[in-house]
Amino acid sequence: MPGANTSPPEMKNSMQALRKSATGPGFTLEELPIPSIGPTEVLIRVEKAGVCGTDAHIYHWDAWAQHRIVPPVTVGHEFMGRVAAVGAAVRAVAVGDRVSAEGHIADLTCFLCRIGDAHICERVKIIGVDRDGAFAEYIAMPEYNVWPLDAAIPDEFAAVFDPLGNAVHTVMAADVSTKSVAITGVGSIGLMAIPVARAAGAASVYAFDVNPAKLELAKRLGADAVFDSRSSGLVDEMKARTGGNGVDVLLEMSGSGAAIDMGLQMVRNGGRAALLGIPSDSISINLAERIIFKGLTVLGINGRRMFETWYQTQALVKSGRVDLRPIITHVLPFEEYDRAFELMQSGEAAKIVLDFTEGKK
Amino acid sequence: MPGANTSPPEMKNSMQALRKSATGPGFTLEELPIPSIGPTEVLIRVEKAGVCGTDAHIYHWDAWAQHRIVPPVTVGHEFMGRVAAVGAAVRAVAVGDRVSAEGHIADLTCFLCRIGDAHICERVKIIGVDRDGAFAEYIAMPEYNVWPLDAAIPDEFAAVFDPLGNAVHTVMAADVSTKSVAITGVGSIGLMAIPVARAAGAASVYAFDVNPAKLELAKRLGADAVFDSRSSGLVDEMKARTGGNGVDVLLEMSGSGAAIDMGLQMVRNGGRAALLGIPSDSISINLAERIIFKGLTVLGINGRRMFETWYQTQALVKSGRVDLRPIITHVLPFEEYDRAFELMQSGEAAKIVLDFTEGKK
Amino acid sequence: MPGANTSPPEMKNSMQALRKSATGPGFTLEELPIPSIGPTEVLIRVEKAGVCGTDAHIYHWDAWAQHRIVPPVTVGHEFMGRVAAVGAAVRAVAVGDRVSAEGHIADLTCFLCRIGDAHICERVKIIGVDRDGAFAEYIAMPEYNVWPLDAAIPDEFAAVFDPLGNAVHTVMAADVSTKSVAITGVGSIGLMAIPVARAAGAASVYAFDVNPAKLELAKRLGADAVFDSRSSGLVDEMKARTGGNGVDVLLEMSGSGAAIDMGLQMVRNGGRAALLGIPSDSISINLAERIIFKGLTVLGINGRRMFETWYQTQALVKSGRVDLRPIITHVLPFEEYDRAFELMQSGEAAKIVLDFTEGKK
Amino acid sequence: MPGANTSPPEMKNSMQALRKSATGPGFTLEELPIPSIGPTEVLIRVEKAGVCGTDAHIYHWDAWAQHRIVPPVTVGHEFMGRVAAVGAAVRAVAVGDRVSAEGHIADLTCFLCRIGDAHICERVKIIGVDRDGAFAEYIAMPEYNVWPLDAAIPDEFAAVFDPLGNAVHTVMAADVSTKSVAITGVGSIGLMAIPVARAAGAASVYAFDVNPAKLELAKRLGADAVFDSRSSGLVDEMKARTGGNGVDVLLEMSGSGAAIDMGLQMVRNGGRAALLGIPSDSISINLAERIIFKGLTVLGINGRRMFETWYQTQALVKSGRVDLRPIITHVLPFEEYDRAFELMQSGEAAKIVLDFTEGKK
């Protein structure tokens, strides 16, 4: 491998990768050269990778993907694996280390990066979206982005530290300790937010969605009560459960205009609303009634804080109080990627992990 | 006066008051009994009172007023005067004290009041809106709401501590120290926010409005630059003036959907937007681009913190760095109230103060 | 009863009270008139009251007590009971309500009270210390101080909401969510802090004391590990358990100079130390090494926030995750007060609750 | 110069440097090779450098210096200059850039660095103390540490951005907006803190010291009042000036035990104390009376936040409200370093800047 004398001798020269090769639906499995690394980069042998809604958008080539993605590109951004090679200037990571990585590659020289807000760097490049991603046998990452894994973190959990980190960032920004919490939208990140919020100190957690299977899962994960978002009377219901005040905290993870409006109504005066779900379009909001008169604090949430969120995520998982096993419904060999997207679309799967070592034996 | 043996002997039995006596435009000047006070209340001889946009809404009987106001009611909520009588259980206020008062009468027993957020109490009654107000020779107020005035505060400033407190609450919530600040909308509160933000530590202040006279005044009050909100290229202009990042803080004081959208675009990633201006209707917002991806903190601002904001307001005025004289464009005898509303509607006046002692000689 | 026509007809005219009647050790049980109440006060029939270390100081008449207490005074400040009568101006409490009360009676008119910091009011009067307290069949309290009890809170827990509130105030100020926490000193408040910290989101909790029985109890209450404070190598031990950094948070509840010094060494750079334990004298601190170079945040903790802490306490207990039963080792009829102080002094008891209804049948 | 083809052709091979060559008092002026730079480093031609109390400790070889410094080492850590060469991987800095630099070289891979707290990295190396410093014609710095200077910042101010940054970090941590502020100790950083606090929004600033010349300077820099720290009645004086409460904020910049005790007494209940001054030994503190009962927040302050503090410092200087000219009492050719330390010791100088370009013509 180019310029890295630390690579193991048995390493082959090419690798398999799941690619969006051209415009249109679907992915292709391609044989590509193993990426070369610069002096401050790390080559990682991918072992397991999580499948995200973003990957499904790219797979199905929807409006968002057509607007955002320029093929060809290797997809995937949630993963764990082992370090296969390190650049000459790499200091804190060594070959053989078991690692995950932050998929947002910030420029590290701009104002935002310099004040500790690299997660909202304006020049960020996202793996699997802006540059080659993790659905491959190998990926090159800046050392800065690599996260050495604690031995106590299971592989499957480590593979989804990216979305789990989204949940943790949202929960921690919302400051849930001793508070009542409503979560609108329990896709995989919303589901993760349930045990995260409880472990972070929430006194009660209520989940809202339109998918009965997800609501069932939400209950198993520790929600005090779950509700079909389309039911009437939910704002009153939440007020009744909170002494007439409304919930202290809203974690908005649906991106639905109706859910956002309902969620903001549910929050008590002076409460906090952390918005992670991405509406596909502009939405209409009664700012006066929903935010201003109520004295609300509304937080836009993007990515994960580097690396405060990662340490928090690790602490929560190590405490044993965040168990993702009910959420990771499927682990599939990576060649079965078409089936993964079918399972996701059917609503049958919560979180799917692809195994990039399976087919190698 | 009923039940208060502390009232001065020369006090007469009736008073003049500006009333919304019935539905429809205009006010009437009426002779009314001087209000009686309970054991925890204070009777105040009003000396000067500020005229607010809210009063103008009620005067002109617009859609908002028709929906909100139930005549008859004495209007006005910004004022200063002297204590004329105190109830038996009043402890910290004495006859003769020079005072202003918080016009939001919170219930003080609910959850929000009990955790120190009385300014967003759900059962608040506002003087001049929900109950008889300050455009009168006398007003009864709970002792809790009374604010003893420091001798260093001029009467005219004291008469407008309510809107000045709105400006201070907004500025302090937005945390402007060393920051760049954009103010969208420089009505009287927006104008007040300029010296307040500078005195509170803002490194630079930019003002936006459609009224050239107000922008001129904004400049005199210390804005580094002022802009017609309808100009094109203002977002780029602000980025150019802030190293490409955008301003750290938005103080939204217009309630205009267009200004809100522009203002949110101007704020840098990770910045703060404090919303005080009340849109008359729902507005369309691109939450993803304006708030979520940027990692913004958006704060709904209502009233004034009781009484942290009042202490901050006092400290700012006493420091000599908040001079309201350019903003208080007119002081009129209260009988000239019709002229006051004409001056306001013409845009000729910034802040008008009515004098309730003038006619008494 | 004077001036309150809402009192139940069967109420007698005198009551029993535990008094410090004169200088010197011990208490006396006296028959006293039932206290009268003013218009904003509430008379409470005490049912259960917690015994605090402060009560023991007064009982044994130690140096602190000799300096602070002016007999005669009824002692006791932690309690619950039922409302027996209310003053004419009382609004949110009714006869028959099951209540506890904040024992710090703030003046409510000073700067600190007016900005929401009544818990550190300079003119505070503490029941059982500065004025008659709760070890009696009846106590008069300002309505402001009364805390209506949720039906889900057991009597014994409600009786010790005061010290539990100290623990909650300390934990919440220290911001423990996802953090590692060391507690130095596990007297009854330190013990309470263990389940409180866990429920509030602490990822790990370590307890330090010199009393093996308390350490054993600490473990039962959920501490990850417990240590004899006199052991050597504890700072290194804590670093080893926290990736070499030290704990994120110190909750200092011993008041011991040695424990404070050790605790500050255990905290990581940039960590937080919340100090609740009261040293009996000045102590020597290496500010440079322990606080300044480390960039520590050190918080002095006093009382309970009114009433944010009370709501948090209620939420934690209602969530079912703060179980005080292992801490409340004894419930005794109030006549057995001498035995209570013997049990405390022997170290046999953690928290003792006196029952003021027992003897009445 | 080794490995850097970007260096200007006229650059010579050796440079002059002020060195602590051996144990004992004094510095020596030596001719040394110009430092080589690695791929991520920057070579800076030093133009102006500030003289700090730390340099004086090393010059006079006091107890602290004997304990901390291992000769030989080039001293000095406050400076500005121009980039002479950049390593191959340097991205955001170019030859010719006018720059200052953060003198604390953090490891950037530890927990603290990874969560944005590099200023308290446990493995920090300080230039001029742990490795060769800035009292030389050239210095090599990691790109990460280099701070490109805004054209509006004068050279002399840029040369002392390090201590000015200490003042800014302290002031911003203490949160002075609208507050009353006491500064104990007005050495050069304490003096800088006066205009910084005012510009950051302090409503009033009081300065305390034992040196009348420094107090005089403090007044010129904008202190509302100045006091000899040894006077009696100062705590009462401060209470009288703050409505009986005490100051909101203490900025402790003396390191004196007596000043710390007095300062903590001056702070109001619930106030904040930011400690920057380094006591030479342990001091005795009455934690109960000074910190715990008062509910104080005490902050240890170390270095400057990277690089939030630097942006704040730049904003304050650019706003025109922080003028250091009265503080920079002398600019001397670097060969006159002995005179600089004489001037410092005599108390005649506040801040001295050495010019490393003077002798070159």
Image: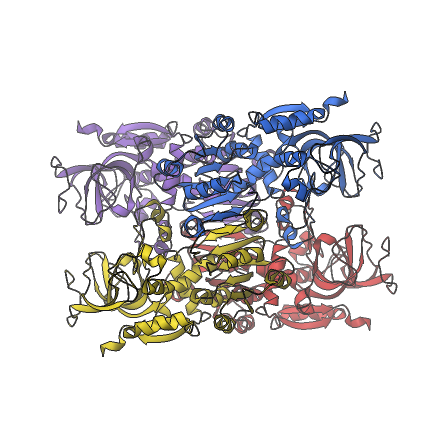
Chain colours: A yellow, B blue, C red, D purple
Q: Residue at image x 47%, y 48%?
A: B285
Picture residue at 36% right of the left edge, 72% below the top: A342
Q: In which quadrant of the rendered image does the N terminus of chain A lie? A: bottom left
Q: Which residue is drawn at 37% across and 53% down?
A: A119
Q: In which quarter of the image is residue B278?
A: top right
Horizontal and vertical percent for residue D276? 43, 43
Quadrant in which the C terminus of chain A appears: bottom left
Q: Residue A248: where, in percent of width, then height?
A: 56, 57
Q: Is residue B202 left or right of residue C40?
A: left
The answer to whether one can see residue A274 in this image is yes
Quadrant hosting residue D164: top left
What is the number of callouts on the image? 0
Q: Which of D259 and C173 is in front in this view?
A: C173
Does the rendering let one see residue D242?
no
Residue A247 x, y percent position in the rendering? 58, 59
Which is nearer the eye, D238 or C64? D238
- Left or right for C181, reference A120: right
Residue lying farthest to the top in this orientation = B361
Please say if C175 is above or below D129: below
Q: Which of D122 and D307 is in front in this view?
A: D307
Q: Relative to residue D292, is residue C149 drawn left or right? A: right
Residue A250 position within the rendered picture, expressed as x and y whole percent measured from the top left: 52, 58
Q: In this view, does B280 lie above or below D346?
A: below
Dividing the picture into quadrants, the one containing residue D53 is top left
